[in-house]
Image (tube, grey):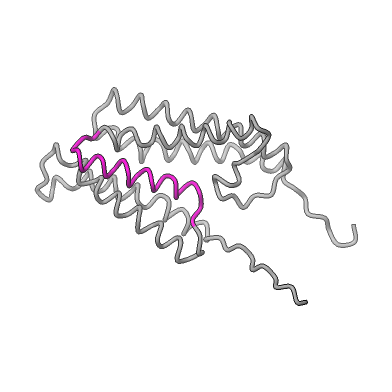
Amino acid sequence: MQIESVPPRRHLPPLVKLALELGPLVIFFLGNAYSERLGVAPDQKLFVATGVFIAATVVALAVHFVLVRRLPIMPLVSGVVVVVFGGLTLALQDKTFIMVKPTIVNALFGTVLLGGLAFGRSLLSVVLDSMFSLTEEGWRKLTFRWGLFFFVLAALNEIVWRTQTEDFWVNFKVFGIMPITVLFALAQTPLLSRYERKEPQPGE
């Protein structure tokens, strides 16, 4: 009996993946920053930005699926929360829903990662759709760090949206959270190098 080989799992090029994941957030910022120039009342800017944010998120997920025929867990969960809480924001004309969305998403991922560790499972590779190959110890340590980091992001969002203006909060999402996340990811490079799983060389 002939055994069919399983096709290799396809991954997006890093720049394409980055554009699809960050593109909707950039569009959200632009919608809030420039809608007033198009005649939108100042107190309605965030609603306009939320509408384009929802549309851009759905488009980004659709493009991702077309390219690789699957959706990674993190963008999918985040996208569902954007649609649900963004929809509630527009339907009820209550900005609280979209402003608390990052808190819920980050707390959810932090709970999943640290909860998985409590049950002996390192779920980071699933959540981040990672292409890294690490030892079990490496995955445990990296998962613990990212789990705590997600809770830090959740706390930061709560502090900012409850104490600052809407425009400051929108700017913080783009020019605060994004650089903080990139810097944190880069800071994990030594751990990735130390615990990288070495593939056996031919003849070993």
Compare residues 1 and 28 and report the one nearer the observer: 1
Q: Which residues are magenta?
A: 71-95
Residue 109 lies within the magenta run: no
Residue 200 image offset from top left, x and y in percent: 82, 55
Asked whether, in this view, residue 145 is left or right of residue 69, the answer is right
Magenta part, dominant SS: helix
Compare residues 109 and 195 and report the one nearer the observer: 109
In this rendering, is residue 19 above or below 164? below
| Residue 102 lies in quadrant | top left
Asked whether, in this view, residue 193 is left or right of residue 38, the answer is right
In this rendering, is residue 5 above or below 131? below
Compare residues 114 and 28 and report the one nearer the observer: 114
| Quadrant, the N terminus | bottom right
| Quadrant, the C terminus | bottom right
| Residue found 73% across the figure and 40% down from its top | 136
| Residue found 33% across the figure and 48% down from its top | 26
Asked whether, in this view, residue 136 is left or right of residue 125, the answer is right
Q: Residue furthest front?
A: 1
Residue 67 image offset from top left, x and y in percent: 47, 66
| Residue found 44% across the figure and 50% down from its top | 76
Residue 49 image offset from top left, x and y in percent: 24, 46
Residue 24 image offset from top left, x and y in percent: 35, 51
Q: Residue furthest bottom?
A: 2
